[in-house]
């Protein structure tokens, strides 16, 4: 037979002790080295949303590094002479106009130029990633439960700066005696 559920109150009382703890805590840490904290925007007890800026690092040197990496990439890409020589060497391969050694030198120079471009692209991507880390953002919605970040400090990568109670959820971890467990 199918019955509808009914909510009732049982006449049983149980005494329990326990701790109220965070459901889950997230450690928010610095991902960069050698950057000075220029602003700390939250305190313990503040409610934050995913993506909110918690702190900012001084990004002047990072901005200069990004600009320098862009210039290095532009310089590497501008070195078109090596690619032009590769195209000429490939066209002249099989003729007696250039020696095999000269052709191989042009091809090697072309490979080197392409490698320089890839290296400059990787350096730029790395600097841009560091630029994104200038702002330390909340990984989830929640409440700040701990803050060790201070303006002017230079935390190492991986140093915890904040602790976040994910979703602001707490849980009670009750401790019951053996007799009370049976009654529950």
Image (cartoon, rainbow, N blue to C red):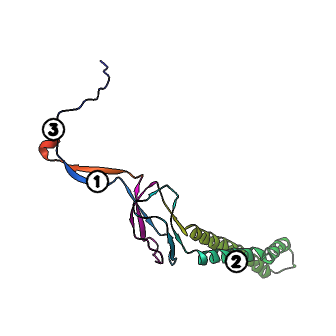
Q: Earlier in the sequence, mark 3 or mark 1?
A: 1
Residue located beneath label 2 in the image? 72
**144 or 31: nearer the viewer:** 144
Q: Quadrant of residue 96 in the image?
A: bottom right
Residue 123 x/y as whole percent: 62, 73
The vertical placement of 22 against 64, above or below, is above
Q: Nearer the viewer, mark 2 or mark 3?
A: 3
52 on left or right of 1: right
Q: Are marks 3 and 1 in contact (CB under 8 Å)?
A: no
- Taking 110 as reference, is 62 left or right? left
Which quarter of the rendering shows the N terminus? Answer: top left
- The location of residue 98, given as percent across then percent down, is 84, 80
> Residue 10: horizontal and vertical position, in percent?
20, 32
Q: Which residue has dot 3 on it?
A: 183
Q: CA distance from mark 2 to mark 3?
A: 74 Å
- Label 3, label 1: how many angstroms apart (C-alpha)? 23 Å
Q: Which mark is residue 20?
A: 1
- The residue located at (32%, 20%) in the rendering is 2
């Amino acid at each position: 037979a199918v019955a509808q559920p009914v909510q009732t109150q049982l006449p049983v009382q149980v005494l329990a002790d326990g701790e109220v703890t965070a459901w889950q805590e997230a450690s928010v840490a610095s991902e960069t080295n050698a950057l000075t904290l220029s602003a700390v925007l939250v305190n313990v007890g503040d409610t934050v949303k995913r993506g909110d800026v918690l702190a900012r690092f001084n990004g002047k040197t990072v901005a200069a590094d990004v600009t320098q990496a862009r210039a290095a990439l532009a310089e590497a890409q501008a070195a078109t002479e090596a690619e032009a020589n590769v195209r000429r060497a490939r066209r002249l391969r099989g003729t007696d106009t250039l020696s095999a050694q000269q052709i191989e030198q042009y091809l090697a120079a072309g490979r080197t130029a392409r490698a320089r471009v890839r290296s400059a692209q990787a350096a730029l991507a790395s600097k841009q990633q560091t630029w994104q880390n200038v702002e330390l953002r909340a990984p989830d919605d929640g409440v700040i439960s701990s803050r060790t970040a201070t303006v002017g400090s230079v935390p190492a990568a991986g140093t915890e700066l904040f602790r976040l109670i994910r979703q602001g959820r707490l849980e009670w971890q009750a401790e019951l005696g053996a007799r009370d467990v049976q009654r529950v």
